[in-house]
Amino acid sequence: MPRISDADRTRNEEAIRAAIDRLLRGELPPGGRCDLKTLAAEAGVTRTGFYPKRNRDGTTRPGPYQHLGEEFERRLKLQRDAGEAPDPRASQIERLKAQVAELKERVATRDAALAELTAFKTLAVSRLTAQHGEIERLREQVAAVDNVRRMRATGSQTAP
């Protein structure tokens, strides 16, 4: 003997179908998502009715509303494949994931450019240090030699 009457089962199936239509239109309750848990809550049935049951002899039988749960999942998948998302949070999550991936790529590019510029700066500073050391050495060498005379600076300070 079934646990619920045929009239109750029919009424529950109608409530589930109405809840499916509402959820797929995007009419989500506060804090709800477009999933079987919210569907069961909206229809006023237990979630376990959407899953297969196990008989005492170990065999399985479909849950009383499993066919409706499968219909809901199928219609939801069709909507998502068509680019429509009844759950605005899901589309927002996808958009934010794409944005995070783009930002990670930009940061990696900037990090590579920064590393390149840091290496260039290190090379430039070491070359300038070497050139300064060479200039100082040459100045000391010129100062130590007596046969080099300094030229007087001209008034205009321009090259001849």
Image (tube, helix red, strand yellow):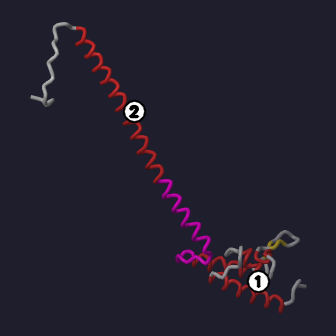
Residue lying furthest bottom in this view? 7
Q: Is residue 130 left or right of residue 14?
A: left
| Residue at which label 1 appears | 43
Label 2 crowd bin: few (<14), some (14–19), many (20+), radius 10 Å = few
Residue under the image location 13 percent in, 28 percent down: 155
Residue under the image location 13 percent in, 30 percent down: 156
**What amino acid type should be assigned to the residue bearing mark 1?**
Ala
Q: Where, by quadrant of the figure, is residue 118 drawn?
A: top left
Q: Is residue 140 left or right of residue 122?
A: left
Residue lying furthest right in this view? 1
Q: Main secondary structure of the magenta part?
A: helix
Q: Nearer the viewer, residue 106 or 12?
A: 106
Mark 2 / mark 1, whichever is N-terminal = 1
In the rendered structure, find residue 103 and report the number of the disc placed on it: none
Q: Nearer the viewer, residue 144 or 59?
A: 144
Question: Which portion, as a residue range, is magenta?
Answer: 80-105
Dot 2 falls on a residue whose secondary structure is helix
Look at the image and tell me in which quarter the C terminus lies: top left
Q: Nearer the viewer, residue 25 or 147?
A: 147
Q: Is residue 134 left or right of residue 75?
A: left
Q: Is residue 84 magenta?
A: yes
Residue under the image location 81 percent in, 77 percent down: 46
Q: Where, by quadrant of the figure, is residue 71 drawn?
A: bottom right
**What amino acid type should be assigned to the residue bearing mark 2?**
Thr
Image position, residue 112 (x, y; %): 43, 45
Q: CA distance from mark 2 to mark 1?
A: 68 Å
Image position, residue 23 (x, y; %): 67, 81
Residue lying furthest top in this view? 146
Q: Is residue 102 above or below residue 140?
A: below
| Residue at which label 2 appears | 122
Label 1 crowd bin: few (<14), some (14–19), many (20+), radius 10 Å = some
Q: Is residue 1 magenta?
A: no
